[in-house]
Image (cartoon, grey):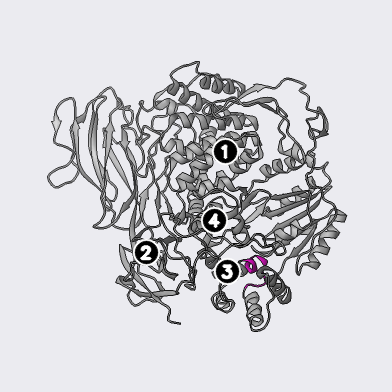
């Protein structure tokens, strides 16, 4: 795929040609009257049709419905719906059997929807019934709807989260089909039948448990079995997990009941803790991919475990994964123990590299590349939330052409936005130009010509500057698309005047721009801030780390600080970039002199010009770092110092009257120097440390001020530096920074060096799970938000270096602690092959039983607390926790 032009396709008035890595899409005018291929009509009902051949269904619906224990009522309903071509939805929480119920019908098409955008999902649905031959036109969303109206089939849609209007849209498109939906919340309304799916009745649940155990439950075990199915609410998936613990790990049924009765969520933690290290890594890779189902060889490579499907088959037998054809994925929904595995078991950067290389080696129009690319989009958010901008740029560059070819244009747009954000943070001008080119091309394809011209003009400027060749192929591609969008095809000028025209993260500072253009720029900046916040929130969910997003002021981006499980690192650019590379966070420019441009290379500055005869001066400019990023408060803080440069752009000297700060609480001017055309002044400070009047600042020269940020309180802090000059002239820059304190928790080892639990730290509304192998330090920024340290017991880590097994809230752990080094010590579990009513291949016992450990003694501000500790926030907090063996 890299560097090679791919076969194009028509979309609307354009011919779309994907040129390959680094160049992007080049558009051409489509030939008038282009005919599609023979097949069913899939295009406009009035006019030249776009034709696609129908796909031959590999497993056409035969009308038969399978059998499931305890689901006779629901199966009868399905038979009726299939015959009458109606719509039905089954609603329940994860693990209630929705997927098995939908598959029992053997539908013509089964699609797991997940988080797919509705328009992208329509493209996938069309591919279930139609074939795109090479060069075939791509369909718009409305054309997809028309194509689907001609389908008569049984369609099963799992893990659906669309709202009622979208469900109504879907029903209209599939009006000739029987539509079977699995969802958590009801949305069908009067358009169909909504059926809540309860857990299995007690007798049915015990029958299923017996089948999964491959033996009869009788005698003293029968009462325990009834207690177990009651504790698990009769959920089939939970019963499969419980049966696996008893069957493969020799768990005693009565002991298992005792552990899960306080809360069924404990079962997930027990199931994860029972796995060997390589199986944990495999499960972590599936969790990283969310609900995507991908080939075992790819998931194994991302997990860095031995290739082969057997390990994933065993996860399926344990109820921890699902198989669909030759692909594997997680059951719908991500329980918390799965998420904890991510930061304990996987190297996210290495996993993303593996995924990107796998996608790049495949046909971008193929099913494998499409499914993997869809799975990669949320991982871009996770990597951005961690500040791994290089991984974001690399993966986004690989993924975006696949999304283009597959017709997943909402995911394509999302990928381009976050890719351009990452390129700007590195900075990487070539990558930023590529993403801007692609984004402008997408705008043009969808009819947003003004936005297309903005993005393509910016891309042309960057590419001309980067390639230093007017006729470079990449430059020519951008110029051609810009001409189609109605632009001139000329690169804009360099310097601040050119750079100021960039989208997202650049400031509009040119002369005579319309009010409408300024409003659009503000809207794009709001979208940019929302993008960063969403990326950080996704990373917090997907990787189990606490993510702190810096405030975005003006059109700059505040730092995205990430604190890991036991360390803290600031993302690239956390302290803001120089003013000349995209604008200062928090520094504003007013229209003091609306008919003048700021000098090339200067920062936007809020300014008031002197008034009166003969005093028409251009505003002084202030350049430098205006956002200090995240700074440790208190005596341990580094108190960073930033240099702000004041420049006189006028042709005559300007008298500096004073340089002041508005509050002087967290920010302080420490020193400064000024060289004028007449003399050398000692600086802007008098003997008492206060700003003093200086001599005139010569024409075209600069002086500097050093400002220290020593926060006295937590959270976002701000001040304004004001330079007074001439007669009533003022220029100012907004200074911002965010102060944090830390919570440090150490899990004390026993005499053998083993640690028997872990701690969850809740700060600023985010939960960070600490790896017990070494001290864990977490930042917090809000002194008013509660802090909570929650200790969880677990099983012994035999190696003495890994973390304890995930014991859940009851402290019930499993064998074999999760190792931060990914050690594969210990035999890979094997077991006899046994099949029992779809239970799948059995999984062998992977470890022996471990003793149970409970939270013991806290030290420091948590002394005297039991399992939970709630220290008073406001400063750095240090504590330790020991775990003691449960004597019972």
Return the residue at label 1. Answer: 359
Q: Residues within 10 Å of mark 1 (few under 14, many from 20)?
A: many
Q: Nearer the viewer, residue 842 or 162?
A: 842
Gap in Å between the C-alphas at discs 1 and 2?
38 Å
User: Disc 3 marks which residue?
Assistant: 245
Q: Earlier in the sequence, mark 1 or mark 3?
A: 3
Q: Are marks 2 and 3 in contact (CB under 8 Å)?
A: no
Horizontal relation, residue 789 to residue 650: left or right:
right
Q: Which residues are magenta?
A: 232-240
Between circles 3 and 4, the one closer to the viewer is 3
Q: What's the CA distance linking mark 2 and mark 3? A: 24 Å
Mark 2, residues whose alpha carbon is within 10 Å: few (<14), some, or many (≥20)?
A: some
Q: Secondary structure at mark 3?
A: helix
Q: Rounded to the nearest whole Å, what is the CA distance between mark 3 and mark 4?
A: 16 Å
Question: What residue sits right under mark 4 in the picture?
Answer: 283
Sequence order check: which comes first, mark 1 or mark 2? Answer: 1
- x and y percentages locating residue 432 in the rendered image: 47, 32
Q: Quadrant of residue 313?
A: bottom right
User: Sequence order check: which comes first, mark 2 or mark 4?
Assistant: 4
Q: Earlier in the sequence, mark 2 or mark 3?
A: 3
Q: Quadrant of residue 577?
A: top left
Q: Mark 2 = which residue? A: 800
């Amino acid at each position: 795929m890299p560097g090679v032009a791919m076969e194009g396709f028509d979309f609307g008035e354009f011919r779309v040609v994907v040129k390959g890595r680094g160049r992007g899409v080049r558009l051409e005018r489509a030939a008038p009257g282009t005919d599609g291929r023979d097949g069913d009509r899939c295009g406009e009902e009035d006019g030249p049709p776009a034709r696609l051949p129908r796909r031959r269904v590999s497993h056409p619906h035969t009308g038969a419905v399978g059998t499931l224990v305890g689901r006779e009522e629901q199966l009868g309903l399905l038979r009726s719906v299939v015959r009458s071509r109606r719509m039905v939805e089954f609603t329940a929480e994860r693990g209630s059997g929705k997927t098995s119920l939908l598959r029992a019908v053997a539908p013509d098409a089964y699609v797991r929807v997940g988080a797919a955008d509705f328009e992208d999902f329509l493209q996938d649905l069309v591919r279930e019934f139609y074939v795109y031959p090479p060069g075939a036109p791509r369909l718009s969303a409305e054309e997809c709807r028309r194509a689907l109206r001609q389908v008569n089939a049984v369609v099963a849609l799992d893990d659906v989260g669309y709202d009622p209007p979208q469900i109504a849209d879907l029903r209209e498109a599939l009006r000739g089909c029987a539509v079977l939906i699995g969802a958590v919340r009801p949305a069908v309304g009067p358009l169909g039948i909504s059926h809540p799916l309860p857990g299995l009745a007690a007798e049915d649940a015990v029958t299923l448990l017996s089948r999964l155990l491959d033996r009869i439950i009788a005698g003293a075990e029968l009462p325990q079995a009834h207690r177990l199915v009651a504790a698990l609410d009769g959920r089939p998936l939970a019963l499969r997990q419980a049966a696996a613990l008893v069957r493969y790990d020799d768990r005693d049924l009565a002991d298992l009941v005792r552990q899960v009765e306080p809360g069924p969520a404990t079962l997930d933690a027990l199931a994860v803790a029972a796995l060997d290290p390589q199986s944990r890594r495999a499960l972590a890779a599936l969790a990283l991919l969310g609900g995507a189902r991908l080939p075992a060889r790819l998931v194994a490579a991302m997990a860095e475990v031995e290739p082969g499907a057997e390990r994933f088959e065993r996860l399926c037998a344990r109820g921890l994964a699902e198989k669909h054809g030759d692909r594997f994925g997680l059951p719908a929904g991500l329980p918390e123990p799965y998420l904890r595995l991510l930061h304990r078991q996987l190297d996210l950067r290495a996993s993303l590299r593996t995924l990107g290389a796998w996608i790049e080696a495949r046909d971008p129009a193929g099913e494998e590349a499409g499914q993997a690319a869809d799975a990669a989009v949320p991982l871009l958010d996770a990597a951005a939330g961690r500040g791994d901008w290089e991984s974001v740029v690399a993966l986004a560059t690989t993924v975006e052409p696949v999304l283009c070819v597959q017709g997943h244009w909402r995911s394509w747009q999302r990928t381009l936005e976050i890719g351009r954000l990452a390129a700007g943070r590195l900075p990487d001008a070539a990558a930023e130009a590529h993403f801007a080119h692609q984004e402008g091309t997408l705008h043009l394809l969808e009819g947003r010509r003004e936005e297309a011209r903005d993005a393509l003009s910016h891309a042309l400027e960057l590419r001309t500057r980067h390639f230093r060749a007017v006729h470079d192929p990449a430059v020519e591609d951008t110029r051609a698309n810009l001409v189609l969008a109605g632009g001139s095809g000329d690169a804009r000028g360099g310097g601040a005047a050119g750079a100021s025209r960039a989208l997202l993260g650049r400031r509009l500072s040119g002369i005579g721009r319309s009010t409408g253009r300024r409003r659009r720029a503000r809207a794009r900046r709001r979208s940019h801030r929302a993008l960063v916040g969403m990326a950080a929130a996704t990373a917090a969910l997907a990787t189990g780390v606490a993510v702190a997003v810096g405030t975005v002021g003006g059109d700059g981006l505040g730092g995205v600080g990430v604190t890991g499980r036991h360390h803290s690192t600031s993302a690239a650019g956390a302290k803001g970039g120089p003013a000349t590379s995209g604008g200062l966070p928090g520094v504003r420019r007013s229209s003091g002199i609306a008919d003048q441009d700021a000098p090339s290379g200067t920062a936007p500055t809020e300014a008031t010009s002197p008034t009166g005869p003969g005093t028409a001066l251009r505003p002084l400019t202030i350049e430098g770092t205006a956002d200090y990023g995240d700074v440790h408060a208190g005596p341990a803080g580094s108190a960073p110092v930033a240099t702000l440069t004041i420049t006189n752009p006028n042709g005559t000297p300007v008298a500096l009257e004073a340089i002041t700060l508005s509050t002087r609480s967290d920010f302080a001017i420490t020193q400064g120097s000024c060289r004028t055309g007449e003399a050398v002044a000692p600086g802007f400070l008098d003997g008492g440390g206060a700003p003093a009047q200086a001599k005139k600042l010569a024409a075209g020269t600069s002086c500097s001020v050093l400002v220290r940020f020593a926060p006295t309180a937590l959270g976002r802090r701000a001040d304004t530096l004001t330079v007074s000059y001439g007669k009533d002239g003022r220029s100012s820059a907004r200074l911002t920074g965010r102060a944090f304190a830390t919570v440090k928790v150490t899990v004390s080892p026993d005499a053998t060096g083993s640690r028997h639990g872990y701690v969850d730290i809740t700060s600023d509304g985010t939960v960070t799970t600490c790896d017990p192998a070494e001290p864990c330090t977490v930042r917090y920024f809000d002194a008013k938000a509660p802090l909570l340290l929650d200790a969880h017991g677990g099983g012994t880590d035999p190696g003495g270096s890994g973390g304890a097994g995930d014991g859940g809230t009851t402290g019930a752990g499993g064998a074999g602690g999760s190792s931060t080094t990914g050690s594969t010590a210990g035999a890979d579990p094997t077991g006899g092959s046994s099949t029992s009513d779809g239970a799948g291949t059995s999984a062998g016992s992977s470890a022996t039983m471990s003793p149970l450990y409970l939270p013991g003694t806290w030290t420091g501000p948590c002394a005297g607390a039991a399992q939970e500790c709630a220290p008073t926030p406001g400063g750095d907090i240090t504590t330790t926790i020991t775990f003691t063996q449960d004597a019972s």
